[in-house]
């Protein structure tokens, strides 16, 4: 019997690989002779690089880059295992909100330059393909800093480089891509993007994501105007629509830069991750799939890891069980979307600290009971002695 175990991380508790290992530990108490294929996953957000490095036997690279405030920060990216020279980057490593103290948060000033430096470092490692996860950014510069780090020239009417951050876009007159790093033309960039926000307006980058980065109403209106001018220049430069494209407003407008200047593809994060680890091929050989995340609820179907797994497993009619740290009141709706069962791992009332500490043991116990129920129901045969 073959069991594919492909969970996301349990936030603040267990990384995806540790979740998979606990599930295997519990199921081995019932099926000691089964073959377990552990495939840690993520949905393109926090933990994506860790999951992909673990799933492919990849390697980490660490370097100093320019942080969102222009000060040096330590960041890392992953090189995936396998024949293809592929790198995976999380924008938040170099340009994340967690790198900006609350008292200094002003999205007019923060820059995405460091994300461009991570891309250059991946190219230096020979990457021919890059997966880049958006999310958790401190910036609202439309990816201008990233483009500058990659060699683009964003100039004022006087021919001088614009200032860092969204505020620099107020003086932007010309975007010149002639000096972009030539290796970008030979590298496929796929962007993990799970939001559909356009660049501008009430659902745009400034209005939706600006407040969490420190923007007030006046700043939002100001930045929206700057991004409108920037987006128009990108559309003229590329000859393609940018401003209204779903996802253009992701991560403070980073989506717009990828679409309009780098010809990158925006895709749901879980789809990119499942493709990178070859999950579809692995599911075709499976008798049972076990996935999960820290909390299961009706929102799980909105691009989260378990939803992607269930969708893919359904193609091959493989039963799927989802395990979680906790279940919301509406989690049972998942039974209508491809999950045979959804189970919570918490064994008894406990404070958060205790629940996090005991998570590996509780998860293993829950996985064991899930295996016993599957065997009892006759969905799978008991393994032979």
Image (cartoon, helix red, strand yellow):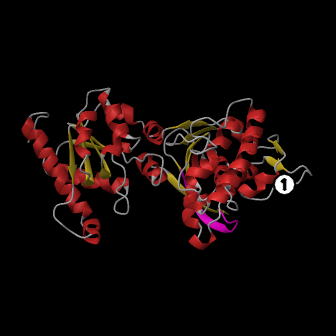
Residue 336 in the image, given as x and y percentages of width and height? 24, 34
Going 35% across and 32% down the picture, which residue do you hit? 312
Q: Residues within 10 Å of mark 1 (few under 14, many from 20)?
A: some
Asked if one can make out residue 302 in the rendered structure from this viewpoint, the answer is yes
Q: Nearer the viewer, residue 334 or 189?
A: 334
The residue that appears at 39% across and 41% down in the rendered structure is 302
Say which quadrant the N terminus sits in: top left
Q: Quadrant of residue 114?
A: bottom right
- The vertical placement of 68 against 384, above or below, is below
Identify the residue at the far bottom of this view. Answer: 103
Looking at the picture, how far across and down is residue 195, in whole percent? 51, 43
Residue at the far right in the pictured view: 158
Point 69% across, 56% down: residue = 113
Q: Is residue 21 on the magenta stretch?
A: no
Q: Which stretch appears magenta? A: 67-78
Q: Is residue 70 magenta?
A: yes
Query: Horizontal and vertical percent for residue 330?
Result: 25, 46
Quadrant assignment for the C terminus: top left
Q: Is residue 139 left or right of residue 280?
A: right
Q: Secondary structure at mark 1?
A: loop
Residue at the (42%, 48%) spot, across then down: 42
Residue under pointer 1: 161
Q: Is residue 289 visible?
A: no
Total numbered labels placed on residues in the image: 1
Taking 263 as reference, is 8 left or right?
left
Q: Report the side of 88 relative to 158 (left or right).
A: left
* Closest to the observer, 296 or 208: 208
Q: Is residue 319 left or right of residue 102?
A: left
The location of residue 17, given as percent across then percent down, is: 35, 53
Q: Nearer the viewer, residue 240 or 199?
A: 199
């Amino acid at each position: 019997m073959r069991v594919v175990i492909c969970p996301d991380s349990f936030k603040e508790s267990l990384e995806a690989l540790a979740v998979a290992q606990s599930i295997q530990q519990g199921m081995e108490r019932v099926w000691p002779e089964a073959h377990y294929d552990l495939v840690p996953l993520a949905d393109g957000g926090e933990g994506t690089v860790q999951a992909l490095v673990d799933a492919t036997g990849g390697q980490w690279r660490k370097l100093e880059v320019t942080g969102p405030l222009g000060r040096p920060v330590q960041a890392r990216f992953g090189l995936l295992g396998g024949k293809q020279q592929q790198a995976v980057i999380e924008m938040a490593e170099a340009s994340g909100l967690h790198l900006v103290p609350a008292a200094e948060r002003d999205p007019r000033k923060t820059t995405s330059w460091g994300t461009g430096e991570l891309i250059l470092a991946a190219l230096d490692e020979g990457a021919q393909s890059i997966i880049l996860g958006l999310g958790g950014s401190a910036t609202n510069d439309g990816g201008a800093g990233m483009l500058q780090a990659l060699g683009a020239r964003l100039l004022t009417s006087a021919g001088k480089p614009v200032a860092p951050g969204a505020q620099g876009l107020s003086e932007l007159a010309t975007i010149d891509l002639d000096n972009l790093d030539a290796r970008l033309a030979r590298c496929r960039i796929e962007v993990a993007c799970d939001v559909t926000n356009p660049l501008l307006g009430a659902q745009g980058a400034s209005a939706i994501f600006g407040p969490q980065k420190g923007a007030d109403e006046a700043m939002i209106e100001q930045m929206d105007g700057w991004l409108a001018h920037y987006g128009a220049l990108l559309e003229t430069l590329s000859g393609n629509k940018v401003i209204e494209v779903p996802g253009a407003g992701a991560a403070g407008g980073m989506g717009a830069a990828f679409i309009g200047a780098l010809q990158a593809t925006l895709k749901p994060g879980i789809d990119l991750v499942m493709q990178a680890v070859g999950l579809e091929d692995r599911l075709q050989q499976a008798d049972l799939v076990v996935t999960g995340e820290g909390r299961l609820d009706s929102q799980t179907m909105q691009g989260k890891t378990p939803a992607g797994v269930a969708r893919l497993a359904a193609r091959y009619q493989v039963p799927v069980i989802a395990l979680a740290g906790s279940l919301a009141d509406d989690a049972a709706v998942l039974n209508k979307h491809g999950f045979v069962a959804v189970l919570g791992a918490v064994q008894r009332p406990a404070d958060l600290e205790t629940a996090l500490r005991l998570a590996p043991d509780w998860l293993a116990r829950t996985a064991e009971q899930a295996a016993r129920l599957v065997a009892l129901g006759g969905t799978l045969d008991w393994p032979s002695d």
